[in-house]
Amino acid sequence: MSEVQHHFIRQQIDQDLASGKHQQIRTRFPPEPNGSLHLGHAKSIVLNFGIGQDYAGRTNLRFDDTNPAREDAAYVAAIQQDIRWLGYTWHEQHFASDYFAALYDYAVQLIQRGKAYVCDLNAEQVRAHRGSLTEPGTDSPYRNRSIADNLALFARMRAGEYADGSRTLRAKIDMAAPNINLRDPTLYRIRHGLVHHQTGEAWCIYPLYDYTHPISDALEGITHSLCTLEFADHRPLYDWILHNLDFDPRPQQIEFARLNLSYTVLSKRRLTRLVAEGHVTGWDDPRLPTLAGLRRRGYPSSAIREFCHRIGVTRADSLVEMAMLESAVRDELDQTAPRRMAVLNPLKVVITNYPADQTGTLTAPNHPKRDDLGARTLTFSREIYIDQADFRETANKKYKRLVLGGEVRLRHAYVIRADQIIRDDTGQIIELQGTCDPATLGKNPAGRKVRGVIQWVSAATAVQAEVRLYDRLFQVPEPGKKQDLITDLNPDSLQTRPDAVLEASLAQAEVTIPYQFEREGYFCRDITDTANGKPVYNRIVSLRDTWQNG
């Protein structure tokens, strides 16, 4: 594992602890339960929980559930599962909705202090009054209502007397502020007819994120509120709310660059489109960068944590190469994944000099570099399968596999010779007949040059399986940059081998254990799918990067 980068956030924390500003560090991870977590969220999870662990601090899980129109309890459970899968446990779990009563009371305080007012402008009118980056906004005609009127109107909003969109509660800051986020931002809006997954129908007004988040942080004693760079322009509002409500001590918001990963998208909106339009099979499609998809594909959670450590934490946005993620996965699996043989495109070979009623047993190590992983037993029989790509009728000297009239070694077994081809009525090769040399088990044949080594599986004990070869979902590094996102989809992101055969030891393989199919890549049994009663194996990653010049 790479050494954890001592980045600018950790440097700030070191200073805060050394100065006595904080006695214990508290961070939080605040997802909205309106979709699946993806690798961008993983970066934030590893950062927040990692700091909590390394500084003997505390990290809370808080669900930002202020928009019940888009949120669901099912996403709450999925997010909890994802965090646990990544290897973390929260100290406290909260919902923003836990604070709805307190948030309402704090809003009343802002009104009483002349810092908030009820506005009757609709959304379009608010936008018209806001101004632009070069022109100041104009005051709402309702900005100077009396405190008494605002308190009464806000109470009637809470009581459900007004229609959606007819009134909002806005902060009274500065309509000429250079930062548009300070031009009297909305704090509360009216939303009737929604059933909140935590509070039911108790509320018909809901606070906005920019108002809810700083107060939630303060109530939980968060010391460092870590968020991505798009919230940097919101930090003055974050601080304004805490200052005007007299919170002390106050959380410190610090921004870091979000994760941008090549050949994929880390946008909930874009991912939702891919799912909704059927370009993928769901939020857990193994081609998606969602944690559910990566888990189903077979990515080790430890490799994702390692990837997050490798990319580090910076203040500048950049595009991280997909190859870096895949390299972290390969490095992990090369050390831990047991080896197995698999034939993805089978071609039957009949060993004519091997008794038809006999099956032999051979021993093969589970890992070439780790004796502690032990060995497994292979079955050898008269009929075996090799891959169609491992045989040619004729070939030049560069071809190192089986050729008609030539020899090749079967991995962990004998040297065989291809003697005869059997074809069907269309001329397709459907079977080879050959012989094996019994004296070559574990030995090189004397005086003969064998072209190479190939995989094989005994037909007598072969496990029938469907193998899915997953690849990058998009064929360009920055999908959607030059044309519509869908146009950039990789048509070969999924190729299926429905008639693959695997060695017998994979018959009862657990879904959580990845294997290296020798010469093919790393694979894991699918969590949910079977194909006509056969197990399904997903390719986690290939053995090497084939996109280096892509």
Image (cartoon, grey):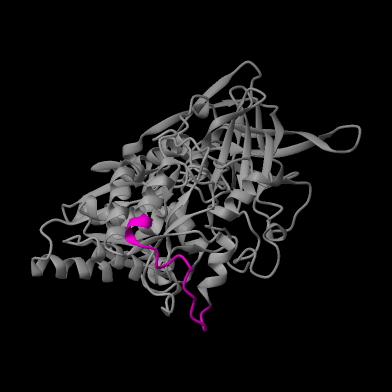
- One can see residue 398 in this view: no
Picture coordinates of residue 314 (x, y %)?
36, 71
Residue 147 is inside the magenta segment:
yes
When the figure is inspected, residue 237 is found, relative to residue 529, above or below; the finding is below
For the C terminus, give its image quadrant: bottom right
Q: Residue at x 51, y 72 (%)?
A: 130
Picture coordinates of residue 440 (x, y %)?
54, 38
Along the line of sight, which residue is nearer the eye, 160 or 99?
160
Res 388 → quadrant: top right
Picture coordinates of residue 240 (x, y %)?
30, 67
Image check: 122 left or right of 280?
left
The boundaries of the magenta stretch are 132-150
Along the line of sight, which residue is nearer the eye, 285 or 349?
285
- One can see residue 475 in this view: yes
Along the line of sight, which residue is nearer the eye, 151 or 336?
151
Q: Residue at x 65, y 45 (%)?
A: 276
